Amino acid sequence: MHQQVRVVPALSDPNLAQLLDVLAAAEVNLVAAGGGNIELGDEFAFVPSEGQEKKAMDALVEARYKPRLLDADVDYKLCWLTDVPGQLLGCVQEATTENLSKGRVVKDILIGIVPDEKGRIGVQVYSVDKESGSMAS
């Protein structure tokens, strides 16, 4: 299962390119990436290739970042989409339904760039507590 990593790309001034350089130097391949307001203090979300999660986390920690490794069963809704209209809608509707009972709302989505062996694209719907509006720490 591809795990999502979230990290604020700031050691002093936010700099996404600097963070990506750390991952590239560690030869971490990204299969999905996303986020919003990334250089305004919010998190950059990415998914390393299967089995490279520890490598990504270690490289970021060594460079003094504070990454969080998320768990699909707890932290976000994982859907596998095919090239058919309405697939993303169905995924978001499922996440919204699950969120209602937990007092959560969708914060952002991360869409994969590399299809799996069945030709599906992974989508991760990240939700946060409705009151806080953010899970970043």
Image: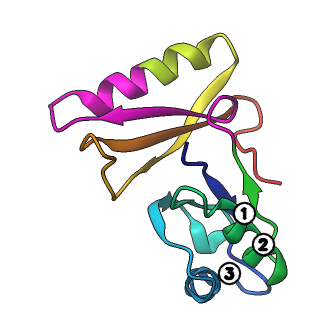
The image position of residue 83, as x and y in percent, is: 17, 38
Discs 2/3, front: 2
Residue 5's label in the rendered image is none
Separation of residues labelled 3 and 1 (CA atoms): 23 Å
| Dot 2 amino acid type | Asp
Sequence-wise, the earlier of marks 3 and 1 is 3
Colouring chosen for the image of the structure? rainbow
Residue at the image point whose x is 34% and y is 58% from the top:
113
Task: For the residues labelled 2 and 1, say whether their Cβ atoms are less than 8 Å apart.
Answer: yes
- Residue 136 vs 22, above or below: the answer is above
Mark 1 = which residue?
Answer: 54
Residue 58's label in the rendered image is 2
- Residue 68 vs 26, above or below: the answer is above
40 horizontally vs 132: left or right: left
Mark 3 = which residue?
Answer: 14
In depth, the one of 21 and 40 nearer the eye is: 21
Magenta-colored span: 71-93
The image position of residue 78, as x and y in percent, is: 49, 34
Residue at the image point whose x is 33% and y is 22% from the top:
90
Few, some or many residues within 10 Å of mark 1 (<14, 14–19, 20+): few
The image position of residue 47, as x and y in percent, is: 54, 57
Q: For mark 1, give the secondary structure.
A: helix
Task: For the residues labelled 2 and 3, say whether their Cβ atoms are less than 8 Å apart.
Answer: no
The image position of residue 103, as x and y in percent, is: 69, 19
Discs 3/1, front: 1
| Dot 3 amino acid type | Pro
Residue at the image point whose x is 68% and y is 75% from the top:
9
Separation of residues labelled 2 and 1 (CA atoms): 6 Å
| Farthest left residue in view | 84
| Dot 1 amino acid type | Lys
Few, some or many residues within 10 Å of mark 3 (<14, 14–19, 20+): some
Indicate the quadrant where residue 133 lies. Answer: top right
